């Protein structure tokens, strides 16, 4: 079932029970067995070149290699894409390219407010291939049960100019990292990952996510 957000703050869609149990378990097994290949997550400085590790902005581990699991995961993502686009209010041709990245969030992990594509005059496109741009961003949540972490919700902010008039109103929505759920939103929506608490500090107990970006030609 896909649940869409009320407009205008902020558009997103959530699909629960996204993967069949066998595929979900295979993804978790792959992630746990690949611990040694994860690296510190990087960020790109605003207006700067290259990527760098900056714990003040982002703390996480990432891995782009999904091995033999990738084709089936891509098929599943593209299968639900039309419904996701409608729920997010996205128009135009359907994206056909995907970027995928595993992210592991342990104790103290977080990601400060940001957008997944550059915004503003003179921006450069950012996508899976040359001439492509990210259209929708997705986060698929999974973890070992019983759940051994807390926090780590996804916070989505409204588009500029769509803040609530009353200062007492909350101008964001927090989405909990529910097991086997996919959350999708426009790539230009500002968002952040709230701090994670994982008392065991063991990799197997981390909050895991499969980050995905749906891309198309400009």
Image (cartoon, rainbow, N blue to C red):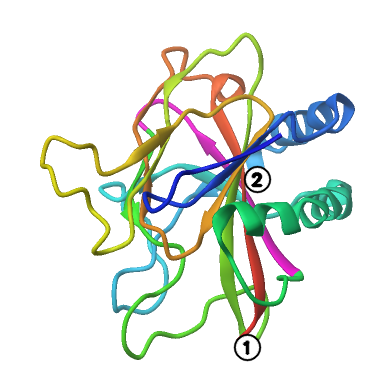
Residue 21, position in %: x, y?
84, 24
- Judge left or right: residue 201 versus residue 192: right
Residue 18 versus residue 52 in the image, above or below: above
Q: Main secondary structure of the magenta part?
A: strand
Label 1: which secondary element:
loop
- Taking the spot 88% from the left edge, 49% from the top edge, the residue there is 72
Label 1 environment density (alpha carbons within 10 Å; few <14, some 14–19, many ≥20): few
Residue 171, position in %: x, y?
25, 44
Q: Quadrant of the N terminus?
A: top right
* Span shown in magenta: 97-108
Indicate whether residue 68 is drawn in magenta.
Answer: no
- Marks 1 and 2, how far apart in space? 30 Å
What residue sits right under mark 2 in the picture? Answer: 37
Q: Quadrant of the C terminus?
A: bottom right
Residue 53 versus residue 201 in the image, above or below: below
- Judge left or right: residue 153 versus residue 91: left
Report how many numbered discs are placed on residues in the image.
Answer: 2
User: Mark number for residue 131?
Assistant: 1
- Judge left or right: residue 86 versus residue 43: right
- Judge left or right: residue 133 versus residue 50: right
Pick whichever, 135 or 101, lies toward us: 135
Indicate whether residue 99 is drawn in magenta.
Answer: yes
- Taking the spot 62% from the left edge, 8% from the top edge, the residue there is 146
Q: Earlier in the sequence, mark 1 or mark 2?
A: 2
Label 2 environment density (alpha carbons within 10 Å; few <14, some 14–19, many ≥20): few
Label 2: which secondary element:
helix
- Taking the spot 41% from the left edge, 13% from the top edge, the residue there is 199
Q: Quadrant of residue 29?
A: top right
- Taking the spot 21% from the left edge, 48% from the top edge, the residue there is 164
């Amino acid at each position: 079932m896909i649940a869409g957000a009320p407009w205008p703050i902020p558009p997103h869609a959530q699909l629960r029970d996204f993967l069949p149990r066998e595929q979900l378990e295979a993804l978790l097994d792959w992630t746990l067995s690949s611990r040694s290949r994860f690296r510190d997550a990087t960020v790109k400085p605003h207006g700067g070149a290259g990527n760098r590790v900056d714990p003040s902005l982002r703390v996480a581990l990432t891995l782009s290699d999904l091995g033999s699991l990738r084709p089936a995961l891509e098929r599943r993502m593209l299968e639900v894409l039309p419904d996701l686009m409608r729920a997010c209010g996205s128009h135009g041709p359907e994206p056909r390219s995907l970027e995928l990245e595993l992210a592991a969030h342990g104790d103290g992990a977080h990601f400060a407010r940001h957008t997944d594509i550059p915004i503003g005059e003179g921006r450069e496109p950012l996508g899976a291939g040359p001439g492509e741009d990210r259209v929708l961003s997705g986060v698929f949540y999974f973890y070992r049960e019983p759940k051994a972490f807390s926090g780590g919700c996804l916070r989505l902010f409204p588009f500029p100019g769509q803040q609530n008039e009353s200062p007492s109103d909350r101008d964001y929505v927090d989405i909990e990292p529910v097991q086997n759920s996919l959350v999708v939103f426009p790539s230009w929506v500002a968002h952040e990952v709230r701090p994670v608490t994982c008392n065991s500090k063991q990799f197997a107990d981390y909050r895991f996510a499969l980050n995905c970006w749906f891309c198309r030609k400009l």
